[in-house]
Image (cartoon, rainbow, N blue to C red):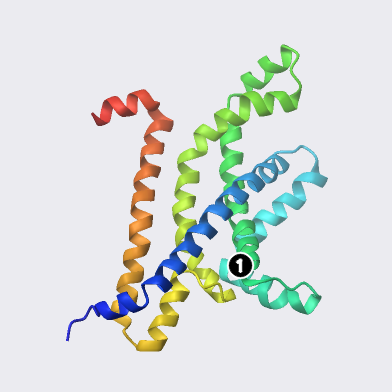
Amino acid sequence: MDLLNLEVVRDYGSVFLHGLAITVMLTLVVIVLASLLAIPVALARLSPSRSIRWPADFYVEFIRATPLILQLIYIFYVLPSAGLRLEPIPAAIIGLTLNYSAYMSEVYRSGIQAVPKGQWEAALSLGLKRWQVLGKIVLPQAFRIVLPALGNYLISLFKDTALASVVTVQELMFSGQIIAARNYQYFTVYTVTAFLYFAVGYPSALIVRRIEDWSRHGWTDTRRKRT
């Protein structure tokens, strides 16, 4: 008997692909939301005002000190007792976004701090407002500095979406579990699941690596080096 049962792949191919589509959707939505939310969190942690800095510090440290799976369970299973009931996908998006925003805010904070202070001073001396200096000078440079790290978070997030299964989101891993529970073809089901993760994750890792080269050497230098 062959280990890889092609009939399972044929019969449940649409289920696998639907789970993969949910996984990719969660990844893209969360990475965009987390990237946007992480910026004000990073700026809050850099604020000289304690009333602004301390809540942001507590949020980041709390998220970092508790497991993501617990955060998802709390949002989906505990909050309804307080009158806040969420559907599985919104609960997963909120939980993943809150988690990744905390971690990515640290990346943004280090990127902002890496921009020389002399550029702040020079821009302010030319009459620019602080928000103009931040938006036009500091953040573009900081974003280029942190771009490789953000790309790595994208890959990690793609894999971490498997934890959304605890809130009953039928992403790729949960789809595999459902199929395996129906036919007990564990080798086939989880081999196909692993292949689908690899089929998306590996090309994404190559793109991230290319982006890392671009951020360090520029697009022209990267093309010259690869040719």
Q: Is residue 22 above or below residue 154?
A: below
- Residue located farthest toward the top when viewing the structure as drawn: 126
Residue indicated by mark 1: 89
Q: Is residue 98 above or below residue 116?
A: below
Residue 108 x %, y %: 59, 40
Instruction: Judge by depth and name the residue closer to the eye, 170 or 116.
Output: 170
Q: Secondary structure at mark 1?
A: helix
Question: What residue appears at the point 32 percent right and 82 percent down from the top-left corner?
Answer: 186
Residue 33 x %, y %: 62, 50
How many residues crowd mark 1 within 10 Å: few (<14), some (14–19), many (20+)? some
The amino acid beneath tag 1 is: Ile
Residue 102 x %, y %: 62, 53
Instruction: Judge by depth and name the residue closer to the eye, 131 or 16.
Output: 16
Total marks shown come to 1
- Residue located farthest toward the left when viewing the structure as drawn: 1
The quarter of the picture where the C terminus appears is top left
Question: What residue appears at the point 68 percent right and 16 percent down from the top-left corner?
Answer: 123
